[in-house]
Amino acid sequence: MAAARDPEAVASALQVVLSRQGDGEVKGLRRLTGGATKTTWSFDWVVQGSPQALILQQTPAPTGPKGRAPKLSAAEDAAVMRVARAGGAPAPVVRLVLEEADGLGEGYVTEAVPGETLGKKLVRDDAFAGARAAMAAQCGQILATIHRLPLQDLGFLQTLSPADELAVYSDLLAACGVRHPALSYARRWVREHLPTDWTPALVHADFRTGNLIVGPEGVRCVLDWEIARIGDPMQDLGVLCMRSWRFGGAGEVGGFGDRDDLYAAYEAASGQPVCRARVRFWEAFSNLKWAIACARRGSASRPDGRPASVELSAVGRRLEEPLWDFFQLIQEAA
Amino acid sequence: MTVFVPDMARLVQATADHLEHELLPTLEGYHRFHTRVCVNVLRIVQRQAEQGAALEAAEWARLRELLASTEALPALNETLVRQLDDGSLPLDAPGLAAHLQATLGDALAINNPKWIGKP
């Protein structure tokens, strides 16, 4: 069955799905973003005159063979969010996971969290000055919580050692056919600096400005759990510090905060030392991964061979940004 | 070569200026976002038309010295990729990292000059 995509069809399908949990009415359905990978809608579920703000996320059915790159199904994604929520991490509250008979494709409904996600506003606007002062420490506490979540109900998660990560992303690069000396250099450097001493934990892997909902008091919710995996927890700290996700902000943590605040809060909350060298390794490696993602987007084609959208083509020309930062990082580390 | 008037850079500049100053203010939402992307792309093309040849010549000169070869630029880049991938060229080879950084910096001067602190 084709998944409903136009607003009227989505609203009436949602009405049927939600009515199974009790009486109410879908109102004010609005498409928020139509990303290349998913479509997000906001709406109110009105029960006896009182509206509950909910979010519908539709994820397209996977096409082609399942690669080794971790990409969770909607049901797996929701399961991770439920475990995270139960363990004290501010993941969205999952109300229901869509089933095939619902006619909406893969996806789930979560409770809406009010706040700002746009990086440029978070790192600059006066309204978030208080949030910026608190967020590095909050992120340290949240990451410590994520990294001690119980894994027994998440058997579907892939475990990726640092060497596995390199193999997965090298395969993605090879598949898109881009050959670039700086990418080859960066892959060699990563291969020659793979950490051997790490303790597996649940890793969010995309924990960064842009995927956080923020209010004036700080972080309210962590979004986008769909590439979670089991790996080296220091990876999450490295991703959060990448310059590509600072949106021009001065703070080395997400454009808003200081590394010392992040590390101190993580150490206090986890009881584990932050290995600063390993965070730098993952920051460098994450820059390589983002560069490979840019190469993939920039070389993407439509079925008829024409280039993919102008948006994806333009992202291809961002390839050098993370590679430039990669060289800065490995020289600081040397 | 044929004298093109205006040349490629100015032709693209005129197009980008029109989209940015005439069309963009009339748009919102989806079309505003994607037209902004189109303007940014045309600015990249304009800078590549202006600077691309000189930057390529500099890259080729560095590579000829680094690899001690006089092959064409694409062939030298392919050789460099192969030697990095198969491990035959050490990462600390003299001039290697400096060449790659210079090439990345030149590409950023075209693709996103702000990333390296240029106007």
Image (cartoon, coloured by chain):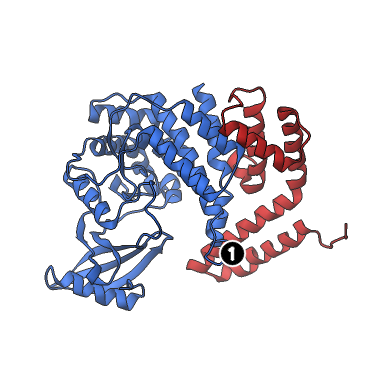
Chain colours: A blue, B red
Tag 1 secondary structure: loop
Q: Image height check: is A137 above or below A10? A: above
Q: Nearer the viewer, residue B100 or A265?
A: B100
Q: Nearer the viewer, residue A87 or A175?
A: A175
| Number of marks drawn | 1
Q: Is residue A325 above or below residue B4?
A: above
Q: Quadrant of residue A168?
A: top left
Is A282 rendered above or below residue B115? above
Question: Crowding at label 1, few (<14), some or many (≥20) Cα neighbours within 10 Å?
Answer: few
Residue tagged by mark 1? Answer: A306
Coordinates of residue A149 in the picture (x, y in percent): 21, 39
Q: Quadrant of residue A26?
A: bottom left
Depth check: give the residue in front, A143 or A219: A143
Q: Specify the amino acid type for callout 1.
A: Arg
The structure residue drawn at horizontal position 88% and vertical position 60%, both measured from the top left corner, is: B3
Q: Is residue A158 left or right of residue B4?
A: left
Q: Position of residue B101 (x, y in %)?
A: 63, 33
Q: Quadrant of the N terminus of chain A?
A: bottom left
Residue depicted at 29% across the width and 23% down the height: A273
Residue drawn at the location 23% of the way across and 30% of the way down: A269
- Visible residue check, residue A324: no
Task: Evaluate whether residue A12 shows in this view.
Answer: yes
Image spot of residue A287 (x, y percent):
48, 38
